[in-house]
Image: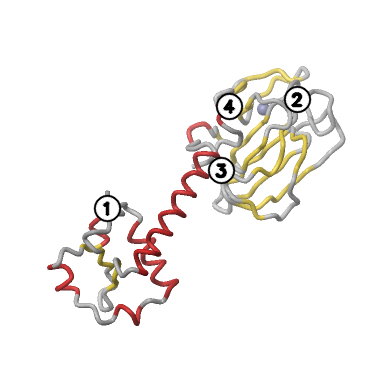
Amino acid sequence: MILFPVNATYHQKISQKFGERKIVYGNNAVHEGIDFACPERTSVYAAKDGYIILAHRTTNSSTGYGNHVIIDHMDGTKTLYAHLLNIFYEEKSEIHAGNAFASSGGKAGTAGAGRSTGPHLHFEYWDHGKKIDPEPYFTLTPQEYMQKLDDLEKRIKRLESALEYGLLRQVEDTGEVLIHPQFKEKDSHLNDITLSLLAKHSLQPLLREIDADKLKKDGWVNSTELKQ
Ligand SMILES: [Zn+2]
C-alpha cells in the first residue's frame, strides 16, 4: 500500500509506465519506475512512513537521477524520487506518509534534473532491492490519506468522551469492552482503539465495580461484536 507521490491533478498523468522500453540519449533501456508528468515545483509526497536514507543533491544536469531521495520504509521496501528541484529534508530524517519533502523538477538542462527531457517526477518502488511496478500498490492520494487520519482523530476524540461519560466499560476479568446501547460508533477498529485508550487513560480502577451480566441484560454489547 503506497500513496501517490503527487496530488490528484497529476497522478493520472503517467507519461511513462514501468517496464516500457525507452530510448535515452541513444541507450535502449527498460523503464524501472513510473513518470508523472507534472510542472516544476509540484509537491512530492512520501509514499509511506519511513526514513530518508539518501538525499542526493547535484549540480550535474546530465547524469541519471539528478537530485533524488530514497526513503526506507523499514519493511523491506524503499521508494525513490528523482529529478527533484528542491529537497527539504536531510538524510536520516523521519518522514510520514503524505509529508511533502521535495519539489519536482526535471526540466532538461536545469541543475539536479539529471537525465530528463522534460518536467516530471520519476518514482520507483523497491521490494527487497528489486524494482517493481508501483501501480498495483497505489491506494490513496495524499489528500485522501490526510482525510482518513483526520477522521481517525475525530473518532478517537468521540471515544475519549464516551469513556469519560461512562459509555464504554471494560470487564476486569476478561478484558472485554462493553458498549452502552446508545453509543452509535460502530466500526471494526473500535475494539482496538478502545483498548489502547483504556490503557492510555488507566481507567482500570474506575471499572472494577461493573457487573458485566447485568450490563449485557441492559443491552450493552461487547465491542468485538461490532465488526462491520
Ligand atoms: Zn522515469
Disc 2 marks which amino acid?
A: Ser
Separation (CA) of disc 4 from disc 3:
27 Å
Residue at the extreme right of the image, as rendered: 59
| Type of the residue with mark 4 | Thr
Provide the residue designation for mark 3: 127
185 and 58: which is toward the camera: 185
Mark-to-mark CA distance, 4 and 1? 35 Å
Which label lies toward us, 4 or 3? 4
Image position, residue 219 (x, y; %):
16, 63
* Disc sitting over residue 116 in the figure: 2
- Looking at marks 4 and 2 on the same chain, the residue that comes earlier in the sequence is marked by 4
Quarter of the image for residue 82 reads top right
The mark that comes first in sequence, 4 or 1, is 4
Real-space Cα separation, disc 3 to disc 2, in angstroms: 25 Å
Task: Say above or below: 106 vs 214.
Answer: above
Which sits earlier in the primary sequence, circle 2 or circle 1? Answer: 2
How far is the residue under mark 2 from the one under mark 1? 50 Å
On the image, numbered disc 4 is attached to which residue? 9
| Amino acid type at mark 3 | Asp
The residue most toward the left is 217
Look at the numbered disc 2 and say if its residue's Cβ is closer than 8 Å to ligand 1: yes
